[in-house]
């Protein structure tokens, strides 16, 4: 049976027209990188809604820092890869971030032509 209230809520301008995309990624950063500042910089990027740290930061002897984070963001029009590329470029443009490697999208491993998505 048709319920006009349900129809209104589904088409309401107050609701998002897309679901947030949930991705996990590994950031490979400079050794001097400060985790709270980096997470704050990611939080203020356009389309980003939620950012959190997945695991303890790993600082290696060779001078790199590995930080696993999750990001929930509102995807733009286009496919998954286009949205990952856009988000990855914004994050890679932040100070101290050298490499962005996407691990999962929506809880599933993500690859492109059998290889990890790395920017």
Image: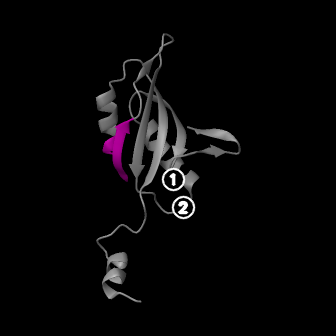
Labelled disc at residue 38: none
Q: Position of residue 60 (x, y in %)?
A: 48, 14
Disc 2 from disc 1: Cα separation? 7 Å
The residue at 34%/47% (across/down) is 50
Graded by Cα atoms within 10 Å as few (under 14), some (14 to 19) or many (20 or more), the crowding at tag 1 reads some
The residue at 38%/30% (across/down) is 95
User: Looking at the image, which is closer to me, 81 or 86?
Assistant: 81
Q: Quadrant of the N terminus?
A: bottom left
User: Bounds of the magenta span?
Assistant: 42-53
Q: Secondary structure at mark 1?
A: helix
Q: Of marks 2 and 1, which one's residue comes earlier in the chain?
A: 2
Q: Which residue is mark 2?
A: 78
Q: How many marks?
A: 2
Image: 115 above or below 17: above
C-beta proximity under 8 Å, tags 2 and 1: yes
User: Looking at the image, which is closer to me, 33 or 57?
Assistant: 57
Q: Position of residue 106 (x, y in %)?
A: 50, 50
Q: Which residue is mark 1?
A: 83
Q: Position of residue 46 (x, y in %)?
A: 36, 51
């Amino acid at each position: 049976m048709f319920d006009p209230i349900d129809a209104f809520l589904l088409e309401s301008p107050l609701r998002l027209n897309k679901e947030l995309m949930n991705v996990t990624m590994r950031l490979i950063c400079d050794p001097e990188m400060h985790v709270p500042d980096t997470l704050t910089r990611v939080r203020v990027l356009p389309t980003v809604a939620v950012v959190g740290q997945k695991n303890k930061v790993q600082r290696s002897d060779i001078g790199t820092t590995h930080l696993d984070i999750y990001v929930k963001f509102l995807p733009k029009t286009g496919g998954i890869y286009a949205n990952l590329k856009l988000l990855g470029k914004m994050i890679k443009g932040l100070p101290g971030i050298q490499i962005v490697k996407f691990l999962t999208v929506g809880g599933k491993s993500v690859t492109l032509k059998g290889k990890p998505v790395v920017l």
